[in-house]
Image (spheres, rainbow, N blue to C red):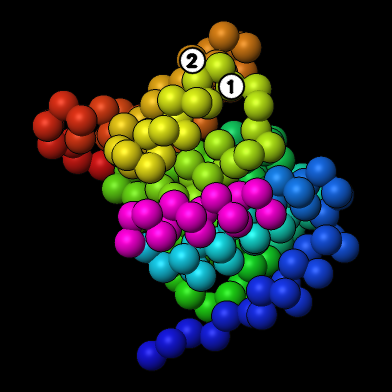
Amino acid sequence: MKTKTPDRIELAKALEKELNYKRFIHTMGVAATASCMAMRWGADAQKAELAGLLHDCAKNLDLRKMLKICEDARVQVSEIERTSEALLHSKAGAVLAQTRYGVEDPEILGAIRCHTTGRPGMTLLEKILFIADYMEPGRDVAEDLPEVRRLAFTDLDACLLRILEDSLVYLETKGARIDPMTESTCRYYQSVRDGREEHV
């Protein structure tokens, strides 16, 4: 049974009003990148585009509003997420995607929910959104972007692990708190690369 999805044009119009312009341009870049990656890897391009459009739908909210959205939906929030808009917007965004924008597809909601930290055993769509968010055309800070963009279309798991490892190094260098889920995700995909089983 096909689940109901919002109209992409109407959704883009709504997001243009909800997000600041820089965030909106980033959102459109992620949606386009994710749909292209989906075509390359045999995923559903429409689902990838929709996940890209909605991945940051809660990004402009303050932390208090994000917490309220998650609490009302009975979404579990970790201690570190309670103090970080950068982390919590993923879970709050998944709730809004369903309640405000009418997304019913659990695969799309799951991709939005984990697009910031990843998770062990990610689905194809989750990997695509995570990578697209990191490397969309407007991104220009990370030094390894050319290699990441090459890997995104040649070796998806190697690309995912490269982003995870580089992100952890960056956060450690900055002295920032690291979400345990990011560390767990990185260890999981290192074990996949090395051919080891890891229970999560």
- The numbered dot on residue 169 is 2
Q: Is residue 76 visible?
A: no
Of tags 2 and 1, the one toward the viewer is 1
Q: Residue at x 54, y 85 (%)?
A: 4
Along the viewing direction, whichever of 90 and 52 lies nearer the viewer: 52
Left or right: 11 in relation to 112: right
Is 33 colored magenta in this rendering? yes
Tell me whether the residue at label 2 lies in contact with that at label 1, contact meaning CB atoms closer than 8 angstroms.
no
Whole-percent x, y for residue 171 in the image: 56, 18
Along the viewing direction, whichever of 199 and 185 lies nearer the viewer: 185
Residue 138 found in image quarter: top right
Whole-percent x, y for residue 89 in the image: 66, 49
- Image quadrant where one finds the C terminus: top left
* Magenta residues, start to end: 28-42
Q: Amino acid at mark 1?
A: Ala
- The numbered dot on residue 142 is 1
Q: Is residue 154 above or below residue 162?
A: below
Q: Secondary structure at mark 1?
A: loop
Residue 73 found in image quarter: bottom right
Q: Residue at x 83, y 61 (%)?
A: 16
Q: Is residue 28 above or below residue 82?
A: below
Whole-percent x, y for residue 75 in the image: 56, 59
Q: Is residue 6 visible?
A: yes
- Image quadrant where one finds the N terminus: bottom left
Q: Amino acid at mark 2?
A: Val
